[in-house]
Image: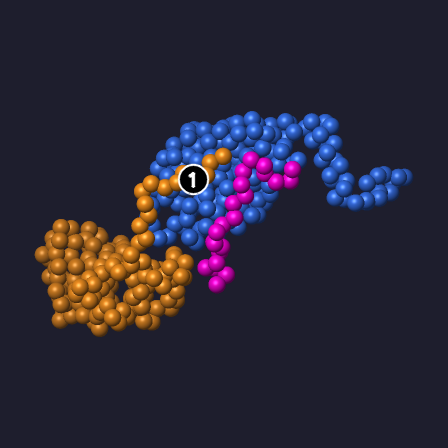
C-alpha cells in the first residue's frame, strides 16, 4: 500500500500484513512489548456457569479490586481474550462455553476456577457434567470450593507471569498458532443435543 | 391456630377426598386419590393456600408407585403462612400420568416440567411438556428413577493436562 498524490493503491494485503509483522516482531523486536501489553489487558468474558460466579463477582468488587491487575470483565465474547470457567459446566452449558471460546479472538487464555472445573468437585460421578479441560485448553487451575477472591487474583497474576516469561503471545503471533499448548478439540460435539 | 386445628380445617374443606393424613415434625401431608387431586388442590387454594413452594417425587420401585407431593403455603393469610401443607397422590409406575395442576397454581409449570424430565411422569393438560434442564438425550434416560445407574468413576484419575 502506498500513497501517491492522494491516491492509495492496495496491493496484496496478506503479503503486506506479513511484511509488517516481520518488521514489527523481527526487526523492531516488539515481542516483549506485545507480551507485556497483553499480560496487563486480560479481559475475561462474562460467562457464569455456576456458583463460583459469586466469587468471580467479588473479585472485581472494590474490596479485592482485580481491575488493578488490568483485568476487566466485559460483555461480548468478541471483545475479550480470557475466559474464566466458573465452576461446574453442565452438558448444556458446555455448548455455550465452546461457542464463546470459538468467538473470542486469539491470543486467548482460559482459567478454570473451582473444584468442579478441575475434576467434578461435589458433582463428581454425576451424569450431567463436563470437565472444562475436555472442551477448551485451560492455562491455570484454581482449587477450592469456591476459591477465595485472592486466589482468583493470584491466578490472574500467574497467567500474567506465564505470558511474560514464556513469551506466549509474541510467539503465538509470530508462528500463527500457540506453540506451548496443545489445541483442544472436544471429542464429541458439545452442541450435538441442540443441533439434533 | 395449632396443627390440630389446621388439620380439622383441611379435612372440613376437602370433605371426603382425603385418603390419609401423614404427619411429621413441622409438616403434614394430605394424600388423596389421583383422580381427585385437581379438585382437592382447588379446594386447598380456596382455603387460602395460594402458592406452591416445591414439587417433589419419591420413587418406590418395589411398591410400583411414585408419590408426587406438592408443598403448598400461603402469602396472604398470616395464620396459614406458618405452615406448609403437602398434597400428594400415588402415581402407578407402569403408567406414569397424572392431571396437571398448572391451572390451579400457575407456579408449578416449570416444576412439572422438571419432574417430567427427571422421573418421566407425564402431566396431562400441561401447556408445554418439554424437558427443562437436561439435554434431551439424557432426559430420555430419566436420571432420578431408581433404576438409573450412574456410571461410577474411579477415585484416582490421570492428572488433567497442565502447561
Ligand atoms: S467449586 Fe464449589 S462453589 Fe465452585 S461451582 Fe463447584 S460447587 Fe460451586
Asked if residue A49 lies left or right of residue A9, the reply is left
| Disc 1 secondary structure class | loop
Which chain is mark 1 on?
B
- Residue A124 within the segment the image draws in magenta: no
- Residue A184 within the segment the image draws in magenta: yes
Asked if residue A17 lies left or right of residue A76, the reply is right
The residue at 47%/54% (across/down) is A188
Mark 1 = which residue?
A: B160
Q: Is mark 1 within 8 Å of ligand 1?
A: no
The residue closer to the viewer here, A150 or B30, is A150
- Where's residue B35, x and y in %? 22, 73
- Whether A172 is drawn above or below B48: the answer is above
Q: Which residues are magenta?
A: A175-196
- Colour used to depict chain A in the structure image: blue
Identify the residue at the far right of this view. Answer: A5
Chain coloured orange: B
- Where's residue B28, x and y in %? 15, 57
Residue B70 placement: quadrant: bottom left
- Whether B31 is drawn above or below A70: the answer is below
The residue closer to the viewer here, B159 or B47, is B159
Amino acid at each position: 500500500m502506498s500513497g501517491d498524490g492522494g491516491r492509495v493503491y492496495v496491493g496484496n494485503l496478506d503479503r503486506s500484513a506479513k511484511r509488517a509483522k516481520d518488521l514489527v516482531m523481527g526487526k523492531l523486536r516488539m515481542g516483549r512489548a506485545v507480551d507485556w501489553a497483553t499480560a496487563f489487558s486480560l479481559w475475561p468474558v462474562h460467562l457464569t456457569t455456576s456458583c463460583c460466579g459469586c466469587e468471580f463477582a467479588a473479585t472485581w468488587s472494590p474490596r479485592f479490586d482485580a481491575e488493578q491487575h488490568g483485568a476487566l470483565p466485559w460483555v461480548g465474547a468478541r471483545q475479550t481474550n480470557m475466559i474464566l470457567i466458573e465452576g461446574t459446566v453442565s452438558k448444556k452449558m458446555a455448548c455455550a462455553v465452546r461457542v464463546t471460546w470459538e468467538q473470542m479472538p486469539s491470543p486467548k487464555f482460559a482459567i478454570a476456577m473451582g473444584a468442579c472445573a478441575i475434576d467434578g468437585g461435589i458433582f463428581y460421578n454425576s451424569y450431567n457434567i463436563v470437565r472444562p479441560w475436555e472442551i477448551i485448553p485451560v492455562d491455570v487451575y484454581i482449587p477450592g470450593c469456591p476459591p477465595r477472591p485472592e486466589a482468583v487474583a493470584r491466578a490472574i497474576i500467574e497467567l500474567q507471569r506465564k505470558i511474560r516469561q514464556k513469551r506466549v503471545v509474541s510467539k503465538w503471533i509470530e508462528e500463527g498458532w500457540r506453540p506451548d499448548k496443545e489445541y483442544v478439540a472436544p471429542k464429541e460435539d458439545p452442541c450435538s443435543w441442540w443441533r439434533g | 391456630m395449632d396443627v390440630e386445628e389446621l388439620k380439622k380445617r383441611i379435612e372440613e374443606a376437602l370433605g371426603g377426598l382425603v385418603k390419609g393424613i401423614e404427619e411429621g415434625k413441622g409438616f403434614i401431608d394430605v394424600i388423596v386419590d389421583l383422580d381427585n387431586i385437581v379438585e382437592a388442590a382447588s379446594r386447598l387454594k380456596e382455603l387460602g393456600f395460594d402458592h406452591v413452594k416445591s414439587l417433589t417425587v419419591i420413587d418406590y420401585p418395589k411398591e410400583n408407585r411414585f408419590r408426587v407431593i406438592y408443598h403448598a403455603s400461603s402469602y396472604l393469610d398470616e395464620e396459614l403462612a406458618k405452615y406448609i401443607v403437602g398434597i400428594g397422590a400415588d402415581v402407578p409406575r407402569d403408567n406414569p400420568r397424572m392431571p396437571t395442576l398448572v391451572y390451579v397454581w400457575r407456579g408449578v409449570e416449570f416444576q412439572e416440567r422438571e419432574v417430567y424430565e427427571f422421573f418421566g411422569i407425564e402431566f396431562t393438560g400441561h401447556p408445554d411438556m418439554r424437558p427443562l434442564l437436561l439435554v434431551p438425550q439424557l432426559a430420555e434416560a430419566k436420571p432420578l428413577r431408581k433404576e438409573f445407574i450412574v456410571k461410577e468413576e474411579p477415585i484416582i484419575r490421570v492428572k488433567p493436562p497442565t502447561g
